[in-house]
Image: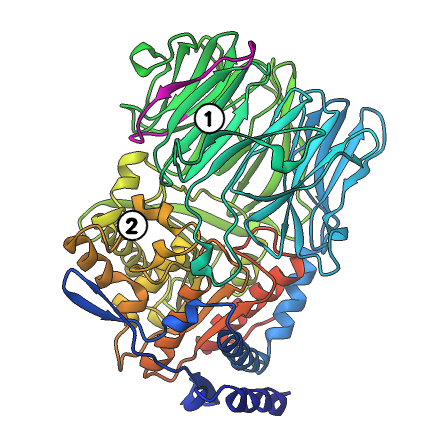
Amino acid sequence: MKQHAYLRLALMAILCPYLSFAQHTSNSTKKMNYPLTKKTEVSDTYFGTAVKDPYRWLEDDRAADTKIWVTAQNAVTQNYLSEIPFRTNIKNKLEKLWNYEKYSAPFKEGDYTYFYKNDGLQNQYVLYRQKKGGKPEVFLDPNQFSKDATTSLAGIEFTNDGSLAAYQISEGGSDWRKVIILKTSDKSILGDTIRDVKFSDLAWRGNEGFYYSSYDKPVQGSQLSGLTQYHKLFYHQLGTLQKEDKLIFGGDVTPRRYIGANVTEDDRFLIISASVSTTGNELYIQDLSKPGNQITKIVDNFDGNHTIIDNSGSKLYIHTNLNAPNYKVVTVDASNPQPQNWTDLIPESKNVLDISTGGGKIFASYLKDATSLVLQYDMNGHLDRTITLPGIGSAGGFSAKKNEKELYFTFTSYVYPPTIFKYSIPSGQSTVFKKSGVDFDPAQYESKQIFYNSKDGTKIPMIITYKKGVELNGKNPTLLYAYGGFGISLTPAFSTSNIILLDQGGIYAVPNLRGGGEYGEKWHLAGTKMQKQNVFDDFIAAAEYLVNNKYTSKDYLAISGGSNGGLLVGAVMSQRPELFKVAFPAVGVLDMLRYNKFTAGAGWAYDYGTAEDSKEMFEYLVKYSPYHALKQGVTYPATLITTADHDDRVVPAHSFKFAARLQDFHKGESPALIRIETNAGHGAGKPTGKIIEEQADKWAFMFYNMGLTYKD
């Protein structure tokens, strides 16, 4: 196999003359062949400063020379991984760990209760349904959508009576979706498939049709030509062609980058959310009870986030952070719904508030130091009770239709496998509905939250998980994982893959960095634009805490993050390369000068700013941009970059260019590799088999480069 891999590389060099090879020695003293990627004379000028971009040609991921480069890089990576002696053992162990029945929380639609189930190693979860007193039956099996199981079920929405369903499918992990409409009684398909849908909810209006959102489909070509600009909200009437669908909102009149819609449970109001970035939205309603009613604007700016969570007749319930960075719930009459008429129902508190509804109740889910606290209120804002949870962790669900008397929620933590509970809304009693079947004994592990000081003195929470009895001697293999962006909160969640690390005496640590949403909008803003360095400082300080307190040392510390977290890993490994032994930047945003030129990238400017904004913003971005911050002759950590050829959210060009420059500049003996998944996207819907292979490669790469072995 080794000779075959190198033969393929030699053939690639013949087919594509700019691919040549350099000899490097890994820490295991095995020589590696990196394809040395051609450099071209390309540069951009920002406010009088020229910035070279020699690997610009890799942005065209559909070009023949880029495909040859991908093949060559994958051959080098797979050859390296194949020589790790315990890689197969880890994969076999993961398959055993993964091979148990997994369920989602049930939900009721019409006469049926629906739930997702995976028998163990099925590539995609299967959607089942069951009548009361009846046996479960398969409703949709995504494993039958395509031969290689890379086509996934990406969402489903039922009419209020449950008689019709519209479901989305994603092919090869793409964000572009198709929508298929079913009659649920016999699963027969109604009408034509709706195509080219992206970043969309499906909102039924009675049983007559539904709303969906999409962009104008880009022409075929590179990801540069795939730039998605303005969203459009359409209404599809059943029995008509897609080309006849009516434009409801967006387009030239109201150009917005993201538009979402839903319809209240009583079918009275269409709710429209419109935004130009990932933070802040306008809010609109349309009263559907009378033909010809116009769309009414509730919030006319992008300064906050607002969602209509429910209604009672003309009374609207709104979840908002207007003048409330930690969010609150307000009410207003739909006849005059602007903010000056809002009345507080559930006031802002010191903890961040999220909201769901069910059974005529409001469920207030608070984040208390990144863990769940759930309170039940009536629709007048009176507290019914605090819901008892099994421990400190993450609880999610708490949603049902208004006439339901029970609902289901899921609880998990880093040492508590996901467990589904049935909850009685009138009594507040919870009972276990489904326990996890994973081979894991929580009693053998512990998870504790600590607070450490960042560079500027800000206290940052971090949860550290390990097997009981682990000696804090600085020699424990440790994975430090974080995100730090877009107001997204990292809350405790169980990972089957992490059992591999914990059972080897390893440590898993997750800090809640600024830029996230764990402490509200102020916490988020403290990690955006020209405050972004706070996020990197928080992560570096977390690593230093783990080293200083003997959880691990620089020789046994790995860092990991995906998407915006991939940016995080790329930035800190370029700023403090000596602090980490291994780095895993996954599907990362790594070119901060050009991220807004691709697909949906322009929508991230609220968090990042752009190089075109100002001289100061450009200088700030280019300083930390991972692709640009790499320096010639520096020893970087052993690095395994991961991306996918169908990723049309964070395009693979980021990872391609970063890998090319890292291989060129890195002077050390540790490997600098890129693993490019084929026929896959940003992550959602990835088949179980591919997930297991990727996780096995990650742990094998980490242990091997720390000089450790895997003990089965």
Answer whether labels 2 and 1 touch (C-beta < 8 Å): no
Residue 515: in magenta span: no
Type of the residue with mark 1: Ile
The image quadrant where one finds the N terminus is bottom right
Residue 300 lies in magenta, yes or no? yes
Secondary structure under the numbered disc 1 in the rendered image: strand
Across and down, in percent, residue 437 comes to: 69, 47
Residue 383 numbered mark, or none: none
Residue hosting label 1? 272
Q: Main secondary structure of the magenta part?
A: loop
Please state the horizontal and vertical placement of residue 279, each as a whole percent of the image: 35, 37
Instruction: Tell me where the magenta segment starts and ends, as one range.
Output: 288-306
Q: Secondary structure at mark 2?
A: helix
Residue of label 2: 608
Q: Nearer the viewer, residue 633 or 495?
A: 633
Q: CA distance from mark 2 to mark 1?
A: 26 Å
434 sits to left or right of 663: right
Q: How is the image coloured?
A: rainbow
